[in-house]
Amino acid sequence: MPCFGRVVKKNRERKQKEKNEKKVSDRPSANSKSQPPERKQLHNYRVVQRNLVYVLGLPTALSSEDTLRRPEYFGKFGKISKIVILHRTPGSSQTTTSAYITYVLKEDAAAAIQVLDGSTLEGHPLKASFGTTKYCNNWIRSLPCNNPDCVYLHDFGDDEDRFTKEEIQVSLATLSVFVII
Ligand SMILES: [Zn+2]
């Protein structure tokens, strides 16, 4: 009489083996990760801007461009080319706000993040990270972009700075390095 338990086990092993084999064949080729995505798929991607700092937790009293540019605040890390402050909703009781600070040099942005992330400003804890941007919709569709103020990307950029939205969300949960704009 065959040992039933053994047959079941064998069967299970075989199924598991098939499953593993299937997994392997489902997997895209090993170097597909290094292949750049097609241009028309780039709307799913975000690109880390190494000269853009996103700061959360700024006291609203300091939230003016002139103040933030000062040498005692963000100016001390290097030359700033642009500041965008995300003002709080009128009438809300928020005591802090967030801002995007674009430095001329990537090194200055990295230095600012290193110093500011986890520090406090007037009693408010700050969170600082690199900002991200996305690809221009026209450029993705190989159309000319006629908007002279378009702030989105019109080239592929560096492979290592390109992430899918999902990858960025994972990073957000684990490293809190990237922020989607
Ligand atoms: Zn554009």
Image (cartoon, grey):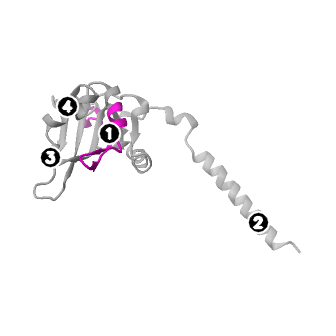
Between marks 3 and 4, how big is the CA–CA gap? Answer: 20 Å
**Mark linked to residue 116:** 1
Callout 4: few (<14), some (14-19), or many (20+) C-alpha neighbours within 10 Å? few
Query: Which residue is at a point 52% across and 36% down the rendered structure image?
Result: 32
Residue that extends furthest to the left in the rendered view of this protein: 91
Q: Mark 1 vs mark 3: which is more N-terminal?
A: 3
Callout 2: few (<14), some (14-19), or many (20+) C-alpha neighbours within 10 Å? few
Between marks 3 and 2, how big is the CA–CA gap? Answer: 69 Å
Query: Which residue is at a point 57% across and 38% down the rendered structure image?
Result: 29
Residue located beneath label 2 in the image: 9
Residue that extends furthest to the right in the rendered view of this protein: 1
Q: What amino acid type should be assigned to the residue bearing mark 3?
A: Ala
Q: Mark 3 vs mark 4: which is more N-terminal?
A: 3
Q: Which element is circle 4 on?
A: strand
Q: Mark 1 vs mark 2: which is more N-terminal?
A: 2
Q: Mark 3 vs mark 2: which is more N-terminal?
A: 2
Mark 3 vs mark 4: in front: 3
Query: Which residue is at a point 31% across and 38% down the rendered structure image?
Result: 131
Q: Is mark 3 within 8 Å of ligand 1?
A: no
**Mark linked to residue 82:** 4
